[in-house]
Image (tube, rainbow, N blue to C red):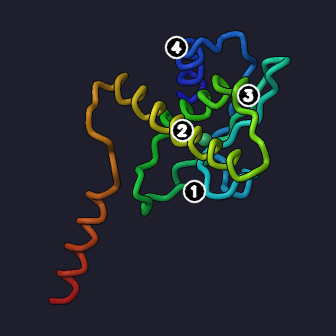
Amino acid sequence: MEEKLLDEWQERLGLQDWLITLRYNCKFEDLELDNCCGETNWEDTIKTATIKIVGEEEHGNDRIQAYDFEQILVHELLHIKFGLISFTQQDYNGMVVSELRHQLIDDLARALVMAKRGETKRKLNSIRVKDNSKKDESSKK
Ligand SMILES: [Zn+2]
């Protein structure tokens, strides 16, 4: 299923000429970046990339954003797409631009996946939080 989604989105995003290796079900310790569910290392010149995505169990469900493999995958593929304009200067402005690009990519990834599924509302883990508060109340009684 994961490889199928990779093929599907590579085609959709016009990245068919890239050789992309996908590693899924990763642990957080497998990623170099902190606090990230996915990570991509790419080489523009030879159009190769390796994408690592953490597993659903490893991600857990106590985060505000629900685990969504497809959305993480599209986010990482967009990093490749934006690769040629992702040079980052190692100063304050460079860091701000890098954060902005990351946020922009995340918004786009979410929008694309939602469009594919015909959704208009962002999926959050808030339902689970509500369930927890119900549990708390019952245990108090
Ligand atoms: Zn990112």
Q: Position of residue 64 (x, y in %)?
A: 40, 57
Residue 133 left/right relative to 101: left
Q: Position of residue 89 (x, y in %)?
A: 77, 42
Question: CA–CA distance between discs 3 and 1?
Answer: 20 Å
Look at mark 2 in the image and give the residue it sits on: 72
Q: Nearer the viewer, mark 3 or mark 4?
A: 4
Q: Nearer the viewer, mark 1 or mark 4?
A: 4
- Point out which mark residue 21 bears: 3
Element type where label 2 sits in the image: helix
Look at mark 4 in the image and give the residue it sits on: 12
Mark 2 and mark 4 lie on one chain; the one further toward the N terminus is: 4
Question: CA–CA distance between discs 2 and 4?
Answer: 15 Å
Residue 97 left/right relative to 114: right
Residue occupying the point 56% across, 30% down: 2
Q: Label 4 near label 2: C-beta < 8 Å?
A: no
Element type where label 1 sits in the image: helix
Q: Amino acid at mark 2?
A: Ile
Q: Amino acid at mark 3?
A: Thr
Element type where label 4 sits in the image: helix
Look at mark 1 in the image and give the residue it sits on: 58
Q: Position of residue 77 (x, y in %)?
A: 61, 28
- Residue that extends furthest to the left in the rendered view of this protein: 141
In the rendered view, would you say 43 is above or below 18? below
